[in-house]
């Protein structure tokens, strides 16, 4: 009997212990579930449905929204730890991680839970949101942008750097309310900005706001003058600096510009950009924005909700710093652009009406020294992204393909006035010299650009061999060292009949950019394919060209061909290049480009090109010329320019003569 009683007591104790354990497990599970729901609500910044104690969910939501409003659109990621039970109460550590201005702010707070029947409720208090946050405090965010890094050119010359500017606008505190509309109209007329839009901005701004109308370079001889601006009631200038190139147009399509971040850029930045931030808008400034911009400094404060800027100035300790990081300066971007040659190229194109370009590079190392697009390009990067039929400069590729079939500069070819292929008649350029017709050398046919002589060789050189020869000269390939968006040409490997015939004179589906033409000329000088480089240490975007954004009216605006997908041909050899150098020199000594014979310094090589396009009668033409002079290769292009020798030729002459 005694043994039975002892056994019963042991069993009862065991059952009681199991029941207690089961009860604890139930509380732990319920508390953990409640903590997870709280973390999810805080992550969404929405506690309107959360089980709370001490305040109504709607009131808590209103308080939450006002507390975090100063942090912008960001939301935290909140995770709950394991609840620590103490009877019907529990403490839960909440881990917060905010992504603010591209940086992470992390910390912990502690939530207090209490069991209420079958539910666990959270005790609502401000320090659930941030450590030691008071009832009357809110969170605010401040960023400090570092100075934008420079874009450098050859020799470390600053191409884009902080230069003095004047911010011009109306100070509403300096003009009576009834006179502000008239003042805005007068200043807009003086600055040549939209008067209606500016008047609207002035009217919408605060009572004492400065409303900027325009930013001007602070340089001698600028217009309007300080006196003209001061004559407008309330108009003032504020001195500042901005990252600018030497002039408004200097290499602008290549370098790009900076300006306020657009809504699209802010959204795509994953928090790195905020409204009002300055960022790259186009060109290298946009492509390398993260490098140039650096990293903003960041501070998160807990402060009284009614703290004004004036109170802050008089009471610096009125707010507490919860998180702070120092700004990290951007890293300068180094390019190969030569300040003098780039400006010379732009000056050379200044009077050209149609879209135009000059590209100059150093064949020995591929450095792009100038990539200028003329005023007729309307801001488009014609120099690097243009897609145009190259015309007779492509006979350089033909010639390499023929050399690989055993031809030499002395090989005899037939230059006839016309040649008919599958019913289509091809002829030479207007004014072709009769003395260079008939049985001529390849050198003479190249020097005078005999179309029929090269088309007649179409059975000796296949389209695939043309493609291979082009890639051997560094074109129609990707540009891994360039570090910028570019189009390096397109040469299809498959064509027959009249299309193959047209390819022999750089027409049909053959497309070049001025950069591609300069690379081809440079490869002849170097005796090996040139790999162009613009950004030192940069990498090219994937693919050979970005989506086409050629201005409307450009003949090739709809074409966006990629680089050749076929394996590159064998690199041009020094022996092959020597023959091509001979041909290019003959263009100057006996052909179309005799005007280049007087360029000072070493001998000049050249090749002219005229490419027809469109369906007009007669068709419009692009004017090309490539030139080599020592360790310099240059391509000049003029859209709708007539003949290469007469339109682009003088531009090349001026550039080479002054380049020295």
Image (spheres, grey):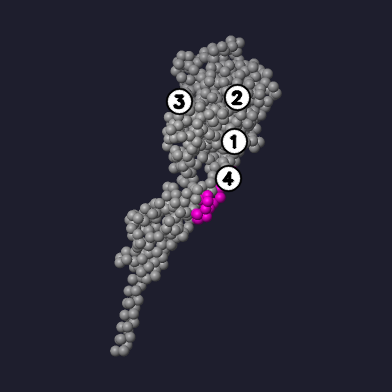
Marks 3,1: beta carbons within 8 A: no
- In percent of width and height, residue 628 lies at 64, 25
- In percent of width and height, residue 9 lies at 32, 83
**Which-is-in-front pick, marks 3 and 4?**
4
- Find numbered disc 3 in the image and state the secondary structure of the residue it sits on: loop
- Find numbered disc 4 in the image and state the secondary structure of the residue it sits on: loop
Q: Identify the residue under disc 1.
A: 163
Identified at 47% across, 54% down, the residue is 303
The tag earlier along the polypeptide, 3 or 4, is 4
Residue stretch rendered in magenta on the structure? 312-331
Q: Identify the residue under disc 4.
A: 329
Of the numbered discs in the image, which one, if any, rests on residue 103? none
Q: Is residue 582 left or right of residue 97?
A: right
Q: Nearer the viewer, residue 230 or 168?
A: 230
Of the numbered discs in the image, which one, if any, rests on residue 552? 3
The tag earlier along the polypeptide, 2 or 4, is 4
């Amino acid at each position: 009997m005694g043994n039975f009683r002892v056994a019963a007591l042991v069993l009862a104790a065991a059952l009681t212990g199991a029941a207690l354990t089961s009860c604890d497990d139930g509380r732990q599970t319920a508390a953990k579930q409640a903590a997870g729901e709280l973390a999810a609500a805080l992550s969404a910044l929405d506690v309107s449905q959360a089980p709370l104690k001490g305040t109504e969910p709607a009131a808590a939501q209103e308080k939450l929204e006002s507390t975090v409003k100063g942090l912008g659109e960001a939301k935290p990621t909140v995770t709950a730890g394991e609840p620590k039970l103490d009877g019907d109460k529990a403490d839960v550590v909440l881990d917060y991680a905010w992504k603010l201005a591209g940086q992470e702010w992390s910390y912990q707070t502690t939530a207090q839970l209490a069991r209420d029947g079958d539910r666990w409720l959270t005790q609502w208090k401000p320090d659930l949101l941030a450590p030691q946050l008071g009832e009357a405090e809110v969170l605010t965010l401040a960023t400090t942008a570092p100075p934008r890094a420079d874009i450098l050119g050859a020799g470390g010359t600053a191409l884009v750097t902080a230069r003095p500017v004047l911010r011009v606008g109306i100070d509403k505190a300096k003009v009576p309310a009834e006179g502000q509309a008239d003042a805005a109209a007068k200043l807009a007329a003086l600055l040549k900005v939209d008067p209606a839009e500016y008047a609207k901005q002035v009217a919408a701004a605060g009572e004492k706001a400065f409303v900027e109308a325009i930013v001007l370079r602070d340089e001698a001889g600028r217009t309007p003058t300080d006196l003209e601006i001061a004559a407008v009631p309330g108009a003032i200038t504020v001195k500042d600096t901005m990252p600018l190139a030497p002039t408004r147009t200097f290499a602008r399509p290549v370098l790009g510009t900076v300006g306020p971040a657009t809504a699209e850029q802010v959204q795509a930045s994953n928090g790195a950009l905020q409204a009002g931030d300055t960022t790259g808008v186009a060109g290298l400034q946009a492509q390398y924005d993260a490098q140039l911009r650096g990293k903003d400094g960041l501070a998160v404060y807990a402060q009284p909700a009614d703290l004004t800027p004036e109170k802050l100035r008089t009471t610096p300790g009125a707010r507490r710093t919860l998180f702070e990081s120092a700004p990290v300066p951007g890293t300068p971007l180094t390019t190969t652009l030569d300040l003098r040659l780039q400006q010379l190229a732009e000056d050379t194109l200044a009077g050209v009406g149609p879209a135009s370009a000059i590209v100059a590079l150093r064949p020995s190392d591929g450095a792009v020294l100038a990539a200028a697009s003329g005023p007729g390009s309307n801001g488009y990067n014609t120099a690097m992204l243009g897609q145009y039929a190259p015309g007779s400069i492509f006979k350089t590729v033909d010639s390499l393909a023929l050399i690989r079939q055993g031809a030499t500069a002395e090989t005899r070819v037939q230059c006839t006035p016309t040649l008919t292929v599958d019913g289509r008649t091809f002829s030479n350029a207007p004014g072709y010299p009769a003395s260079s017709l008939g049985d001529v050398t390849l050198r003479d046919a190249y020097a005078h650009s005999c179309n029929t002589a090269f088309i007649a060789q179409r059975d000796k050189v296949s389209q695939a061999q043309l493609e291979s020869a082009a890639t051997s000269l560094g074109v129609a390939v990707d540009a891994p060292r360039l570090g910028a968006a570019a189009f390096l040409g397109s040469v299809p490997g498959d064509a027959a009949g009249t299309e193959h015939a047209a390819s022999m004179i750089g027409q049909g589906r053959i497309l070049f950019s001025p950069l591609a033409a300069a690379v081809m000329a440079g490869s002849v000088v170097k005796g090996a394919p040139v790999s162009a480089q613009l950004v030192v240490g940069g990498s090219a975007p994937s693919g050979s060209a970005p989506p086409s954004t050629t201005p409307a009216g450009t003949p090739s605006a709809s074409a966006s061909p990629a680089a050749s997908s076929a394996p590159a041909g064998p690199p041009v050899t020094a022996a092959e290049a020597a023959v091509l150098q001979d041909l290019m020199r003959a263009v100057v000594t006996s052909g179309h480009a005799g005007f280049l014979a007087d360029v000072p310094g070493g001998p000049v090589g050249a090749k002219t090109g005229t490419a027809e396009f469109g369906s007009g009668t007669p068709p419009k033409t692009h004017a090309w010329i490539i030139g080599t002079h020592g360790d310099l290769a240059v391509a000049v292009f003029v859209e709708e320019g007539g003949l290469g020798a007469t339109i682009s030729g003088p531009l090349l002459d001026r550039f080479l003569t002054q380049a020295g």
